[in-house]
Image: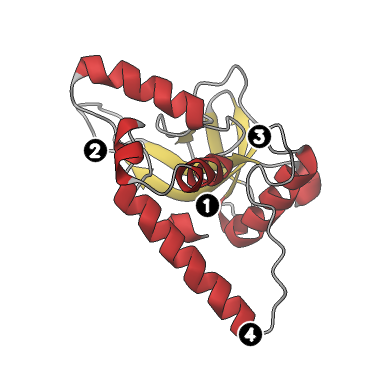
Amino acid sequence: AASLSVRDVFVWPKDPDEQAIAKEAKGRLSDQRSDFLTVLKVLEAFETNGQRSQWARENYLNAKSLFEILNIRKQLVELLRYAGIEISSVGYAKSDPSGTQSMDACDAIGKAVLAGLMGNLLVSPYRHAYVAALLSSEEVRDVYIHPGSVTFGRYFDPRYVACATIVESSNGGRTRGPKKYARGCMEVQLEWV
C-alpha cells in the first residue's frame, strides 16, 4: 500500500549505454510475478544494504521514493497498532531462507493487494489487451500492460491482472488515439476473487 502514492522506485537513465546497465539491475531486483512483489524485494534489499542512497544510485533506484515508502509503511503500522489490529507481515524473503518468496506468501500478498484493487481487476479477452472484469464500461477497454511493469513482455499474458492505475499515453502521431496502460500490475488467480 505504501508504494502506491510515490514515484516509481526504478530510475531510467537517458544515456543509452547506461540503460542496459539499469535494465540488468532492474532484472536482478525484480520478481517477475508482480510489481508489488518487486517493490517488496527492492525494499528488503535496500534495508539489507543499510538504506544507503549510494547503494540505491548504484542500482538505479530512486532513494527518495524508497525512503517515502518506508516512512508511509511506518505510519500505517503505527495506525494499525493504535487501532488494535494485529499485524502479520510476510515481508519479501522472510518466509524463505533462499531469498525468494514462497507461493503461500505470494498468494497472501496477492489476495491482500487484490482486496484493495478489486475495482482495477482486468481480464484478457484476446492477446495482450485487457478490459475491466467487473464493469461493462467502454472507458476500460483495450488496456495494455505498461512496458515499465515487470510483468510486461513475459512469454504469456496472464488471464487476470489487477493494476494500481490505468494511464493514457499521448497520441504520439497515431490516428487511433491515445493508448491505455495498466501500471503496478499483478497476475491474479481466479480463486482469489
Q: Which numbered tag is attached to residue 83?
A: 4
Q: Position of residue 97 (x, y in %)?
A: 72, 37
The count of marks equals 4
Kind of residue indicated by mark 1: Ser
Mark 3, mark 1: which one is toward the viewer? 3
Q: CB of mark 4 within 8 Å of CB of mark 1? A: no
Q: Position of residue 117 (x, y in %)?
A: 58, 57
Q: Secondary structure at mark 1?
A: loop
Q: Identify the residue shown where x is 60% and y is 85%.
A: 82
Structural distance between the alpha carbons of marks 3 and 1: 41 Å
Q: CB of mark 4 within 8 Å of CB of mark 2? A: no
> Is 189 placed left or right of 5 in the picture?
right
Q: Identify the residue shown where x is 19% and y is 26%.
A: 14
Q: Position of residue 169 (x, y in %)?
A: 29, 38
Q: Which numbered tag is attached to residue 99?
A: 3
Residue wearing tag 2: 170
Structural distance between the alpha carbons of marks 4 and 2: 43 Å
Badge 1, how many Cα within 10 Å: few under 14, some, many 20+? Answer: few
Structural distance between the alpha carbons of marks 2 and 1: 21 Å
Q: Position of residue 29 (x, y in %)?
A: 49, 31
Structural distance between the alpha carbons of marks 4 and 1: 37 Å
Decide which of 99, 87 is in the foreground and name it.
Answer: 99
